[in-house]
Every structure is written in C-alpha cells, then in structure tokens.
Image: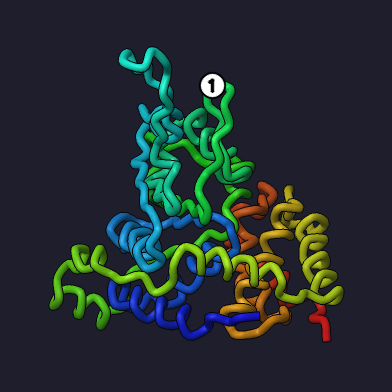
Amino acid sequence: MEIKNREIKEIIHILSEFLQGKENAIKLSLIAFFSKGHLLIEDLPGLGKTTLAIGIANIFGLNFGRIQSTSDLLPTDITGLSIYNKALGKFEFHPGPIFNNVVLVDEINRATPKTQSALLEAMGEKQVTIEGETYKLPKPFFIIATQNPVEQFGTFPLPESQMDRFIMKISLGYPSREAEREILKGGSRREDLYKIKPILKKEDVLTIQQEIEKVYISDKIIDYILDIAEFTRKEKFFSAGLSIRGTLAIAKTAKTNAYINARDYVIPEDIQELAEYTIPHRIILKEEYENLEPQEVIKSLIESIPVPV
C-alpha cells in the first residue's frame, strides 16, 4: 500500500496558511473527502468555510461549484435542466453546479425541503435523475454544506435522513487571538488561494480512496463499532440511535484516519478520535434529555464501552 502521508501533511500545512489555527478542521475535512463522504459545517458566517472548500478543490486540481441556498432556490438550480435548442431541433441538457468535483452548498438550511431533497440522490448515489434520464456525477465528488447554528428565521431544519448522509459534522470556530492578529496584519488572501498549485492530481485522489478501502479492520474493531451502535440504540438517552449508514461512516473514517497516520490497519483510537464528529448529528435525544449536549453524551458513552485489545 502506497501511503501518501507526506503529501497529505503538506496539504494540511499549505491550507493552514489560509486558515490559521484550523489544522484539525482541515484534517477532518480531508478525512471526510478521502472517505468518499460529505461534510456538514455548522458555524457562524465569516469563519473560513468558503476558503476551506475552495482550498480543497484547488489543492487537488478539481472543479469547484458553489450553490447559495435561498428560499426560492429550485431543484433545477442545483441539478441543471434541459433547454430546447432551436438550431438542432431538440432538447439539450445543461448541467447545474452539482456536476463539479467539490460543491459548496452554502446555508443549506435556507433551501426548502423540496430543494434539499434534490441533494439526497446526489449525495447517496453519486448521480442525479432529471426528466427520466440518469446522469453520473464526476469522481471524486464531495459536498461541503454549511448552516448557521444561530439564525433560525427563514430556515428549514435538515431532516434526519439528510443529516445521516453527511459522514461528518464539524465547526471551524473562531481563530485564536494570535491567529486573528496575523490575519489582520496580512489582510485577505483569497486571491492567493486560487494560485495554489495542486499537490496531488485527481487520479491520485482516486488511488488514495481505493487504497483506503484496503485498510485492514479486524473483527474485534468491527465488534467495537457494533457495541457503540448498540449503546445508542438501547441507552435511555436516545429515541433514535445509529443507522447502518452511521456504522459504515465510523468504519470508513476510521480507515482514512489510519491511512493518514501511515497505518494499514485500524486501531480503537481511530474511532475514538472521530466519534464526536461522526456520531452526534445522527442520533436523536429523548425529549427529557434535550438539554444535554449530544457530543458530551457520546463522549461519556464511548468512555463506558470496553476497548478491544
């Protein structure tokens, strides 16, 4: 197995120059990307979500598309539509922004449920069906969706089925005082972001994704994941526990974490490190426990489960 550990570390270092103090968020985003999943970022505006998405696209030489969600956004604004060509005497399909490798869906919870549902097939099946025709999406394909955790007016909360399709949910948070000082001294570097030279090519990304699938995960680790899932399904705190898609997400991201750490096998720490990003958005707390933080509940749950040796 060809571990491209050095290149991945270089990518994190380069992107950190544009997102100072956000090395962990960058690493988590790359884990979601290499795991063939999609990423939900819940954060306040102006903290670097767009910078992160553009940076990931450019560092791999991939196409980038952006969808600004609004209440009047239509499904065809995402997928594209067929337009009649008079000269040819037939309809021609004009692809929408979803047909890019990296797609930023900004403020996804401002789109109506009907428009949000247009993303479900794309995220789950890596294809879209328009007027009876099915179109495959490019490889690799990565959606970064954002939502504002504070603003509720004019928003449509994502249903559980949509949340479950995001392999991870993270936040960037405010930069440290020192990092913000450097940002203020240096000013915006958005233009420099577009000048980044790709470290890895599209073919390299696809190769890495294939190699990650070969990372060894033992029966003991699989049982560990199943123990975690069983706890979320039976513990008194939860009205809905992990789905099968959730357990698959834990396994996939654990393999990627192992790969990035130059290992060809999964250890319990690969799961534990990512649990607060892979699990909380998939579970539903019972009404009497809604005042608890899902991350804290999951953290204590993980600590109570015996670790395989």
Q: The C terminus lies in which quarter of the figure? A: bottom right
Q: Nearer the viewer, residue 120 or 45?
A: 120
User: Which sits in the foreground, 143 or 150?
Assistant: 143
Q: Exactly how many numbered labels are in the figure? A: 1
Q: Is residue 291 visible?
A: no
Question: Residue 167 at what x, y percent from top left?
Answer: 59, 57
Q: Residue at x 33, y 59 (%)?
A: 54
Q: Is residue 217 above or below residue 78?
A: below
Residue 137, percent from left and from top? 52, 44
The residue carrying pointer 1 sits among few (fewer than 14), some (14 to 19) or many (20 or more) residues within 10 Å by Cα, namely few
Relative depth, front residue between 179 and 16 = 16
Asked which quadrant contains residue 193, the reply is: bottom left
**Residue 1 horizontal side relative to residue 117, left or right:** right
- Find the residue positioned furthest to the front: 88
Identify which residue is drawn at 48% across, 85% down.
6
| Residue 11 position in % (x across, y down) | 40, 76
Vertical position of residue 199 compared to residue 230: above or below: below
Quadrant assignment, res 219: bottom right
Instruction: Determine which residue is flagged by label 1.
Output: 131
